[in-house]
Amino acid sequence: TDHRLAPDVEETAEAIASMEIRGAATIAAGAAEALGTQAREAEADSPAAFRASMRAAARRLRETRPTAVSLPNALRYVLRRMDGRNVDALRESVTDAVAEFVAQLDRAQEDLGRVGANRLADGDTVMTHCHSTDALACIEAAVEGGKEIEAIVKETRPRNQGHITAEQLRGMGVPVTLIVDSAARRYLNEADHVLVGADSIAADGGVINKIGTSGLAVNARERGVPIMTAAQTIKLHPETLTGHTVEIEMRDEAEVIDPETRAGIGEIAVENPAFDVTPPRYMDAIVTEHGQFPPESIVTLMRELFGEGAAEPWAE
Ligand code: RUB
């Protein structure tokens, strides 16, 4: 560990890596808040030392999980607003940027919730995958608008984030049917919409989300069920504008099979990719706080909001 890091930064980094803090928006807020803690607690005796400690904190947070671009986008947002002639001024600029970022995140989620809710009609049944706060914001806005919504919730192996979705939907008063992932195609017969979130959205409109999203999208298309992604613009992946691809996180095989069972089977390989890419042609709409977009036109919004290039603010 880096001695310049506040203990809370290390704790947040570990919580993100272990998925105690998870989901793209929640990771972004957690990382930004950790930078705020670093700014308050950094024992820096010069502006240069303060800036270096902030960059070190950002690098530590950055390396936790590779796929959700909201994480580096959050770090960029805060570090690019770091400004001041002395440590106190620098500290204040970071604290202000963090507060602004978190407030924007909440506002964006509320705004996109209202957009997504417009796609849902009274009496609709929605199928969900994983747990997405952006997706749930759409259902919440629909319910608050007086629509009756029911949900079919995929459990989402191996981490069962569907359980969180089920609990939160029940909190909104939404009737929930929980199914295993393999039952999804069968239950598409009963769904009017598929609604998912995103960890990253690529410049070509590809949606990177929890493993299984792409298969669900293909099945939904085959069954004629519309599928939408709810994703605030912090999920847009700026580096894909210049040809970079989005790294898909490979997680520990112990999430898939316990070591004893594995040993009993004999010599096998186990793989555990956490995310997949849904090609834009299988996605009907991307719902953001700026309105809904066909996936193919999301690149315009990406250019407008993120432009192209610029050195990473956490580089040493
Ligand atoms: C979470 C996941 C979610 C997105 C969007 O994966 O794939 O659908 O992150 O969530 P994991 P949100 O559980 O591996 O982090 O809308 O809350 O940002």
Image (cartoon, rainbow, N blue to C red):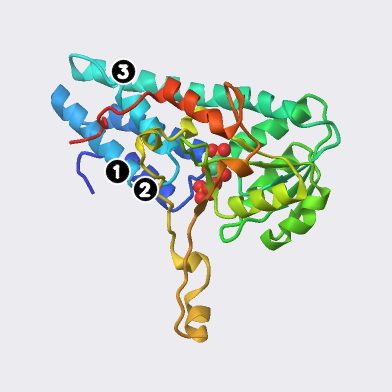
The label nearer to you, 3 versus 2, is 2
Q: Are marks 1 and 2 in contact (CB under 8 Å)?
A: yes
Looking at the image, is 150 positioned above or below residue 82?
below
Q: Which residue is mark 2?
A: 64
Callout 2 secondary element: loop
Placement of 113 over or under 88, stated as above or below: below
Q: Is 165 or 276 nearer to us in this picture?
A: 276
**Which residue was labeled with disc 1?**
60
Circle number at residue 45:
none
Q: Amino acid at mark 2?
A: Thr
Q: Which residue in the rendered view is the most extreme toward the right?
A: 123
* In the depicted structure, whether residue 218 falls above or below residue 33: below
Q: Position of residue 246 (x, y in %)?
A: 41, 45
Residue 158 falls in image quadrant: bottom right
Which quadrant is the C terminus positioned in? top left
Secondary structure of residue under mark 1? helix
Query: Taking the image as four quarters, which one is ligand 1 found in?
Result: top right
> Which three-letter amino acid code belongs to the residue tagged 1?
Arg
Residue 247, image x and y in percent?
40, 49
Give the structural element (helix, strand or loop) at label 3: helix
Q: Is residue 260 above or below residue 295?
A: below
Count of marks placed on residues: 3
Q: Nearer the viewer, residue 75 or 284?
A: 284
Q: Is residue 295 left or right of residue 222?
A: left
- Residue tagged 3: 93
Alpha carbon distance from label 1 to label 3:
21 Å
Q: Callout 3 environment at 10 Å: few (<14), some (14 to 19), or many (20+)?
A: many
Quadrant of the rendered image containing residue 139:
top right
In primary-sequence order, the first of circles 3 and 2 is 2
> Considering depth in this image, is 89 or 160 the residue closer to the camera?
160
Q: Within 8 Å: ligand 1 and the Cβ of disc 3?
A: no
Q: CA distance from mark 3 to mark 2?
A: 25 Å
